[in-house]
Image (tube, helix red, strand yellow):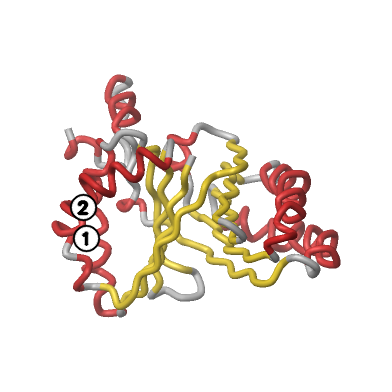
């Protein structure tokens, strides 16, 4: 899988316009290999919008970028709204989902995304720590819906999806420091930079893949996804 990580800095007086424009990305759900998109505003910087999307393969993503992205982007007129944008893509090398990916988009209300840069020659040590300790332990914590670990060269993206803010706060109070103490001495040898973002999810920005919308319709389930308007 491939995970796309977008960060946009938006002026305060343009936040409503950006939010409305972000809702126009629902056309992406028809794209081959698209597995879902979610986003929201930063907890510390409420002018920073972050969007994450998942794709089955790099080829699916590149086909979308070539054939459809520009057309949708022009319709949103977002280029006139934000001040700056940074886009990065990562290959997912490890994931742990406690529920189906399709359900994560519906149930997540908080997402934590941490960008980590490591010494290139020591990347294997970072991966080993994540695979053996961080991902399995955090994934088992109450309220975690799933986790993804993405890689691009010596930069990594660690993403966790949470059902409620209170569960993430409990993790930070009772477990985070324990994991940090266990890995701190070793991580100092290979970790050069780490920056985290905590996102409050905007439900209207969520885009489910077309097959999931069809499944909900067959079950006659209608939720905050506003499915009736998107038949």
Q: In the rendered image, which quarter contains the C terminus? A: top left
Mark 2, residue position: 24
The residue drawn where x is 21% and y is 43% is 27
Is residue 209 depicted above or below 219 in this figure?
A: below
The answer to whether mark 1 and mark 2 are in CB contact below 8 A is yes
In this view, 216 is above or below 80: above
Local packing at callout 2 (Cα closer than 10 Å; few below 14, some 14-19, many 20+) is some
Q: Nearer the viewer, residue 143 or 231?
A: 231
* Residue 112 in picture, x, y percent from top left: 55, 58
Question: Where is residue 48, by image quadrant?
Answer: bottom left
Q: Which mark is residue 108?
A: none
In the image, farthest residue toward the top: 218
Q: Position of residue 65 (x, y in %)?
A: 28, 49
Dot 2 falls on a residue whose secondary structure is helix
- Rendered position, 4 above or below 97: below
- The numbered mark at residue 21 is 1
Task: Decide: few, some or many residues near mark 1? Use Cα within 10 Å; few <14, some 14-19, many ≥20.
Answer: some
Distance Cα–Cα, label 1 vs label 2:
5 Å
Percent of width and height locating residue 53: 40, 48
Horizontal side of residue 4 vs 28, given as left or right:
right
Q: Position of residue 68 (x, y in %)?
A: 21, 46
Q: Please, what secondary structure does the residue beneath circle 1 have?
A: helix
The residue located at (76%, 59%) in the rendering is 174
């Amino acid at each position: 899988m491939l995970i796309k990580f977008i960060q946009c800095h938006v002026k305060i007086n343009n936040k409503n316009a950006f939010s409305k424009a972000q809702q126009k990305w629902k056309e992406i759900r028809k794209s081959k290999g698209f597995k879902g998109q979610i986003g929201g505003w930063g907890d510390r910087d409420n002018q920073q919008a972050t969007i994450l999307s998942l794709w089955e393969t790099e080829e699916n993503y590149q086909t979308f970028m070539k054939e459809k992205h520009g057309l949708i982007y022009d319709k949103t007129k977002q280029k006139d709204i934000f001040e700056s944008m940074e886009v990065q893509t990562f290959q997912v090398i490890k994931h742990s989902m406690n529920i189906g990916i399709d359900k994560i988009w519906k149930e997540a209300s908080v997402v934590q995304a941490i960008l980590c840069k490591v010494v290139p020659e020591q990347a294997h040590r970072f991966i080993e720590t994540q695979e053996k300790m961080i991902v399995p332990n955090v994934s088992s914590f109450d309220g975690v819906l799933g986790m993804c670990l993405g890689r691009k060269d010596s930069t990594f993206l660690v993403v966790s999806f949470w059902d409620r803010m209170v569960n993430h706060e409990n993790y930070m109070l009772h477990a985070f420091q324990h994991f940090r103490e266990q890995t701190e001495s070793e991580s100092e040898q290979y970790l050069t930079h780490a920056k985290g973002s905590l996102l409050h999810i905007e439900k209207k920005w969520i885009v489910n893949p077309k097959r999931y919308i069809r499944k909900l319709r067959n079950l006659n389930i209608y939720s905050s996804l506003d499915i009736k308007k998107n038949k």
